[in-house]
Amino acid sequence: MAHRAYHSLSRLVVHLPVPSGKLRRGLRERAAASARWLQWATDRPGSGPVVWVHGASVGELLTARPVVHRLRRLDAAPIVACSYSSPSAADWRGLAWADHGDFVPLDTPEDVGTVLDAVRPMVIVLARGDLWPEFLGQAHRRRIPVAIVGASIRPDSRRLHRPLRSLYANVVEGVSWIGAATQGDMERWRLLGARASAIELSGDPRHDDVLERTTHSGPIRSLERWARDRSVLVAGSTEAGDEGTVCDAIRLVLKERERARALLVPHDPSPRILDRLLARLQRARVPSASWAPSDRAPPDTACIVVRATGILNDLYALASVTYVGGGFRRGTLHAVIEPAAYGVPVLTGPHTEASPDAEAMAAAGGLATARAARDLAARWLGWMDDGEARVTAGLAARRCLSAGAAALSAKRIAEVLDG
């Protein structure tokens, strides 16, 4: 019954009224993606094996990136086709490692089947676990092996409960290899219906990605003088739920330390959100301005709101202390491993339970949570006044990162390609 309902909905969804925004754009782009995939399959250069990599958004694709870099080193270097379902991935400028990138087709037998027949991938690699039942089912019917890298399922995922569990069980059972990010993920993939023999504890390739990444100083050069010899809080990927706490904490710290500085990097730097943040800072009497890489940093401005995307990882290089957004709602905390790679201590909101990385860093002393502005300000001031404690916490956060998952994942996928 769940399968019939899903098939009916997948055909109807593009015709349903959807509010404007990312969801509407994503559905529109996916409806038109099949034609673009067919055109690429006709025009693509080279005749090597095609590896189809899929991730929901930028974070998932970053999980796949170090695996793909290792696959590129094979004697028969593959052609890499990359799909995604979020518009944020379409707008991302960091997809140069793929030969082709586009939205995943609508999850209908007609769209998916036609595209797979044209592209003829030798293997499909899913990052994290963005599972589209028809996409996987059509791949299994064509005997296309499927691997999942950095495979994770949140403990509170609805997929683990009926009726969704029965919908996913059939397609997950046919997956050739699942590289689970954690021991808990291994158990949840078994519960979802994966074969125990297909699951291996691999670790998270995203750790390899942040550990191997080189900072690009060009985009942030105009901020280096502004940040020099100051205690800088970089608040990255902030959501609406973070804004009050972070802005009030900046106000409290500036009352105590005039030379403190803050960089606010909203997850969605749309004009509406930028205006809202600047207005909130103005009401708090915090000197503030917006900034993009093409601007000169105002030298005497205590707080800068970044109106650019794709440079947060580089901005963390300026940080003495970091705050990662999303922790004021369950299940929405953003990546804490990016600042940890710089050996910088991490602060978040109170909800870390869906992030194994955050939980591990908290246990090691490299991450602390804040429920209110005074908590965040106190931690920032404490690390400002005690440099040794700040360095110790930052190193504790970095030691929670482990390399090797990308190499193991690429090895298993190469074994599938050899077969």
Image (cartoon, grey):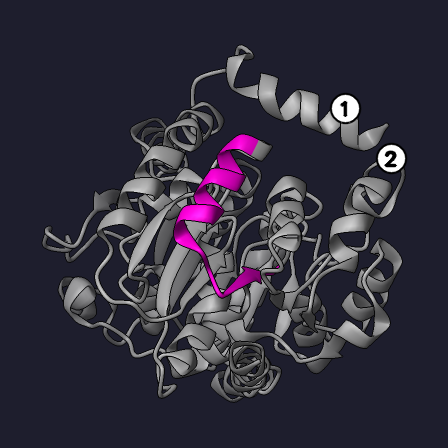
- Whether residue 402 sits left or right of residue 152 in the image: it is left
Query: Crowding at label 1, few (<14), some or many (≥20) Cα neighbours within 10 Å?
Result: few
The amino acid on which the numbered mark 1 sits, given as a three-letter code, is: Ala
Q: Is residue 27 visible?
A: yes
What quarter of the picture does the N terminus occupy?
Answer: top right
| Residue in the foreground of this view, choosing between 377 and 267 | 267
Q: Residue 273 in magenta?
A: no
- Whether residue 243 sits left or right of residue 355 in the image: it is left
- Tell me which residue sits at (35%, 79%) in the image: 72
Q: Is residue 306 visible?
A: no
The amino acid on which the numbered mark 2 sits, given as a three-letter code, is: Pro
> Which corner quadrant of the image does residue 58 belong to?
bottom left
Q: Classify mark 2: helix, strand or loop.
A: loop
Up-down: is 358 above or below 297? below
Query: Crowding at label 2, few (<14), some or many (≥20) Cα neighbours within 10 Å?
Result: few
Range of residues picked out in magenta: 110-128
Mark 2 and mark 1: Cα distance apart in space: 11 Å
Residue 107: image tag: none
Q: Which residue is mark 1?
A: 5
Q: Classify mark 1: helix, strand or loop.
A: helix
| Position of residue 52 measured from the top left corner of the image (x, y, whole percent) | 46, 59
| Position of residue 271 measured from the top left corner of the image (x, y, whole percent) | 29, 30
- Tell me which residue sits at (52%, 39%) in the image: 112
Up-down: is 399 above or below 249? below
- Whether residue 212 sits left or right of residue 126 in the image: it is left
Q: Which residue is mark 2?
A: 163
| Residue in the foreground of this view, choosing between 68 and 110 | 110
Q: Nearer the viewer, mark 2 or mark 1?
A: 1
Pointers 2 and 1 in contact (CB under 8 A)?
Answer: yes
| Position of residue 44 measured from the top left corner of the image (x, y, whole percent) | 24, 55
